Amino acid sequence: MTDDDIDSLVARFEDGTLPGAEWTHGAHLVVALWYVRQHDRDEATARIRDGIREYNRRAGNHTGYHETITLAWVEVIDRFLAGRDRRAPISVLAAGLLDRCGRSDYLLQFYSKDRLFSAEARAGWLPPDLRAIG
């Protein structure tokens, strides 16, 4: 993906024109990376949370949002960026993030499946039960 592709992805996510087929795990991560890079952590988290909820609402998905997964990925992305130049092209950062952390099961090194996929984790933040995110 180029920087322009990523900017387009974020714009289409925000305005609700991103097709569901393009709202992949990787797209979630790249959009979250874009927000974490552009804003302080609290603002980025709020924008990601609200954006996913609104995107899901527009798609008729009223149960798809997962608070613990969202917040855990914000932590992963924030830590990823801590060791990098945030001024680097977003496409370079995205490629590095997806290469290092992009597997859909990545969070399972920190969480047991039962904890991560529980109703409690979906509704609110649960800290990892296997090891700290690092």
Image (spheres, helix red, strand yellow):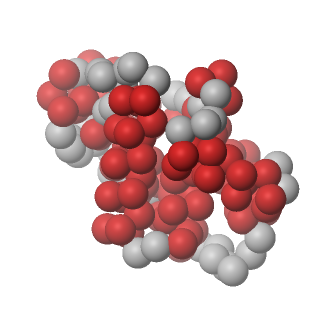
Q: Is residue 113 above or below residue 35?
A: above
Q: Is residue 80 visible?
A: no
The quarter of the displayed image where residue 69 is located: top left
Q: Is residue 6 left or right of residue 66?
A: right
Q: Is residue 91 above or below residue 124?
A: below
Q: Where does the image place residue 46, in percent across and percent down from the top left?
A: 32, 58
Q: Is residue 12 above or below residue 90?
A: above
Q: Where does the image place residue 108, in percent across and percent down from the top left?
A: 43, 31
Q: Is residue 108 visible?
A: yes
What residue sits 20% from the left and 43% below the top?
Answer: 125
What residue sits 64% from the left and 28% below the top?
Answer: 19
The quarter of the displayed image where residue 123 is located: top left
Q: Quadrant of the C terminus?
A: bottom left
Q: Is residue 48 left or right of residue 20?
A: left
What residue sits 15% from the left and 28% below the top?
Answer: 120
Q: Where does the image place residue 54, in percent across and percent down from the top left?
A: 38, 39
Q: Is residue 5 left or right of residue 82?
A: right
Q: Nearer the viewer, residue 89 or 104?
A: 89
Q: Where does the image place residue 122, in percent across and percent down from the top left?
A: 24, 30
Q: Is residue 38 above or below residue 4?
A: below
Labels in figure, total:
0
